[in-house]
Image (cartoon, helix red, strand yellow):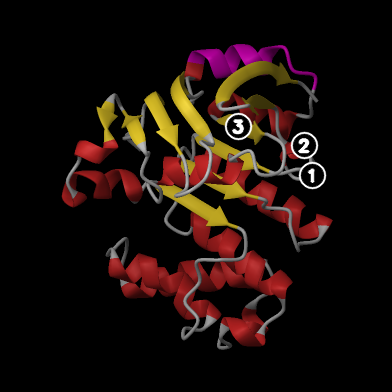
Amino acid sequence: MSRLIKSLGFENLSFHYEGQEPLLKNINFVFPVFNSRSSQDKASHSQTIERRRTASRQAEIVVIRGTLGSGSSTLLQILAGLQIPTSGSYLINGIPVEKMSFEEFLPFRLRIGYGFGMGGLICNRTLFENLVLPLNYHKFCSQQEATDHVLTLMDRFDLMKYKDLRIAYVSPSHRKITVLIRAVIMKPEVLLLDDPNIRVSTEIQQMYAELLREQINNGNLHTIFITSFDESFFSYFDYTSIYIEGTKLITMHEFKH
């Protein structure tokens, strides 16, 4: 699959919510995005199990770290195009997003998957309808292929018995699993996950990590950004950390497992 998203960066970017102090201020930063050569070098020094090394050769896993309220979730929302910088630019492939028309930004948006907390699901739709909707709306595949794809994933994560229920009638755990599945339903290149381990069991975290490895190894997914105060999920991968220090971003060292 031809890669569309080749670089992500900030140019003199600042962001603040109305009436609040800046979370990010005058940031110039190039985010780690998959590079086959650097990823192979990184994997060659890893002492991890083979499946983890295989994924790390083909993807960049980036953990955004910061104290509570430092803006890690907001940073992911900017990368998703859901928040507009107060000033400066968010660049995709060197092009300022704020200068793109809706039609120009749409191909990038469709290759960015995101799962934020417990939100984003449509209240008056069933779990199945929430998952199949983006596939059908964007004509990602035929309706039958979309149905088969969604049902396969729902069965894999033991959601079939809840597929015809609206989100108000399922547990927070099943709602969270649905959010996580929907984040990858269109096989994105770049994935943004905000607290993916919240309200899901260790078993589900392992299953989801395996699903991500499959998408990485199939050549679809090449870069994952994760925010979490709990290391239980991103510890399944080799990863690079970016720290939010004050209003700045700092790349530290790569963690090896």
Amino acid tagged 2 = Ser
- The answer to whether residue 161 is above or below residue 243 is below
46 drawn magenta = yes
Residue sitting farthest toward the front: 19
Q: Which mark is residue 61?
A: 3
Query: Which residue is label 1 attached to?
Result: 230
5 drawn magenta = no
- Which residue is at 27% across, 65% downward? 139
Amino acid tagged 1 = Asp
Q: Dot 3, how many residues are within 10 Å of its Cα: few (below 14), some (14-19), or many (20+)?
A: many
Question: Percent from the top left, x then y, of residue 131?
Answer: 48, 70
- The answer to whether residue 69 is above or below residue 24 is below
Quarter that holds the N terminus? top left
Whether pointer 3 and pointer 2 mark residues with C-beta atoms closer than 8 Å, the reply is: no
- Earlier along the polypeptide chain: callout 3 or callout 2? 3
Q: In the structure shown, which secondary structural element does the residue marked by tag 2 occupy?
A: helix
